[in-house]
Amino acid sequence: MINKLSPYVGIAALASPMEVGAGRAEQAAADLGRVLESAGCKVVNGGAIKNADQARTAGLNFAEKHVSCIALAAASWFEDYLVLDLLEECDVPVIFWALPGMETGALCGTQQATCYLNQLEKPCRTVFGEIGVGESFARCMSFVRAAALYKCICRARIGLAGQHVRGMSEVAVNEFALKKTIGSRVVPVDMVGLLNKARTASQAEKQKLWNQVKSSVGVVQVADEAGQLAAGMTLAVREVVQREGLSGLAFGCYPDFMGYACLAASLLADDGVPIGCEGDVNGVVGMLILTLLTGQPTHNTDWLDPLPDGSVVFTHCGSGSYALAERRKDISLAPVRLVNQGVCSLFPAKPGPVTLVNLVPVGEGYQLAVMEGEALPADMVFPGNPLCVKFQPPVHEIIEWIHDEGIGHHWMAGYGHVAAELRAWAAIAGSGLRLIRK
């Protein structure tokens, strides 16, 4: 099962002792912690911070607990050095929640603090209003979840089996820029070793897994021999994922190994481990980001043709999780297109709100393109996992935007609208990550 992000947040309240509103700091910290916990966050309460010693103590406590961000209620005006001293001990993204009060100066305090933090290029954000569920809370949670995502992605190890497709330069990974900008690192995986493990794995284990897969779908159009090899590759990939501590794997399938790891991609996606096609490490990072934000498996797709109704078909050859199918009984196991080998899982994708991302290296950094749309019921217009998406802007505008901005052709799609979190995450990542939205 895939677990959604569970942000670990340090919370406290800021105030200067002589200011109006300072007396409500302790309660503000408790209220902020309560509302964050109601949204699934884990919190560490640093209490009221009214002097430098309290700031340092709270910072040390937050650092010891390895929080991913700090949420600070502004009960009144406060000295900016309180935040600086706090961050000296625990340097993570900060969100301020300024409480209303005409005489308190809470907004003044947050404005001077964010001015300072922006000069230092420290990621921060402010919301305003009474603490509770509502628009301010939704914006606060977008930032909190983005900070948790940043921490996870910084620690991600992405395997690369084989190499990216020749003549598909845009999917090539820039390992230095990836580590510097996003934080993930690449782990080379021996393709020959994977193939050998797939072939020499226990026949009984391969047959058991293949039988389980066959019994869970509607139609089987491949021989048991091909199914057993695909099951063996699934076992081999699982082993290397566990051994290397991988968060995802890019598999260099096209053209020689097409169909070899599609079944592994379908099955491991349900464990929260995305397997990407064509050796696209960047795409796998995009899949992992969406998996963490949505708590669901994601689609790995190409942009295909627009339909007469203005929607667009996205798909690859058939490596999607079965949880992405509209109807389980429609899943068909078949050889991969073009080369008629291996095992792919073919089905139309389910409808619902979706977010699509494209991640490519640009210069010394990375570029993240983001679109939100609505997936409609799809027909099997392509032998894969066709995902039919309707966007708000006209399709011709989106196509022009893609070419004008130099966006790549691999689009990763996750169910749910998470563009707000992606915007916050890109801001936390810093200037090396260029975010573009349509």
Image: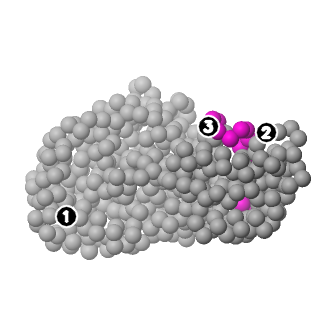
- Image location (x, y in percent) of residue 381: 29, 35
Task: Point out the stretch of residues depicted in magenta.
Answer: 121-135
> At numbered mark 2, what does the secondary structure look like: helix, strand or loop?
loop
Amino acid type of the residue that numbered disc 3 sits on in the rendered structure? Val
Q: Nearer the viewer, mark 2 or mark 1?
A: 2
Q: In whole angstroms, how far apart are the C-alphas of marks 2 and 1?
A: 61 Å
> At numbered mark 1, what does the secondary structure look like: helix, strand or loop?
helix
Amino acid type of the residue that numbered disc 2 sits on in the rendered structure? Pro
Q: In whole angstroms, how far apart are the C-alphas of marks 2 and 3?
A: 15 Å
Identify the mark at residue 100; answer none if there is no mark.
2
Residue drawn 34% across the image and 52% down it: 1
Residue denoted by label 3: 133
Mark 1 or mark 3: whose residue is earlier in sequence: 3
Is label 2 in contact with label 1 (beta carbons under 8 Å)? no
Identify the mark at residue 232; answer none if there is no mark.
1
Mark 2 or mark 3: whose residue is earlier in sequence: 2
Asked if one can make out residue 123 in the rendered structure from this viewpoint, the answer is no
Residue 218 found in image quarter:
top left
Is label 1 in contact with label 3 (beta carbons under 8 Å)? no
